[in-house]
Amino acid sequence: MSKKTRRDDVHLQRLKTEFPDIYRALLAGEIGSARKVFVLAGIEPERTRLDKLKNSWAKATDAERDAFLTWLAAKGAGALAPRLTFPAPASSDLPAQTPIASGRYLLPSTIAEIKAITARRRLTPQDVMQEMGFEAEGRALSGALTRGASLRLSVIAALEAWLRANRAEPTGT
């Protein structure tokens, strides 16, 4: 079975009470994963190919993304490739125009930079969200930093400004 989360605990309890036959099949090993069971029971939606592609893109390294874009261009989608390619920031001295995200997903270099700033300033993701004016939404940023989860575009825009302000800060604060 896949990695268990708190959400899975709630879903498993619901499965046990509302869908006992499916729950028994899971326990007996007839169904290989909790995700398949939840979809079968209608508790979670089926992931589309687009959902899977977005998830894979968010988890891919810069080299893997470049290789994919090269492959995409070779397949005849060359007009899309320049719009999809983002230079990865090598250091925090880059200009503010450097993208920090690909769509709703933070770039790996951005995640590293945010983690460095939060460690230096001893901040939690909750603190960062509050500094940007978002109340009680630290879990969203925490998920983006640890699991590569997506963020709302308004949070990404606020993060760009927050990063610019914190890049200018002296390292001794």
Image (cartoon, rainbow, N blue to C red):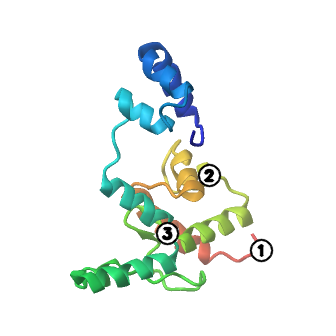
The residue where tag 2 is placed is: 127
Graded by Cα atoms within 10 Å as few (under 14), some (14 to 19) or many (20 or more), the crowding at tag 3 reads: some
Q: Is residue 165 above or below residue 54?
A: below
Q: Residue at x 43, y 82 (%)?
A: 66
Disc 3, SS:
loop
**Labels 2 and 3: the sequence-earlier one:** 3
What residue does disc 1 label?
172
In the image, is 148 to the left or to the right of 125?
A: left
Disc 1/disc 3 C-alpha distance (Å): 34 Å
Alpha carbons under labels 2 and 1: distance apart: 19 Å
Closer-to-camera residue (132/57): 57
Q: Which residue lies under the disc numbered 3? A: 60
Q: Nearer the viewer, mark 1 or mark 3?
A: 3
- Amino acid under label 1? Gly
Alpha carbons under labels 2 and 3: distance apart: 28 Å
The percent position of residue 94, horizontal first and vertical second, equals 53, 86
x 58%, y 52%: residue: 142
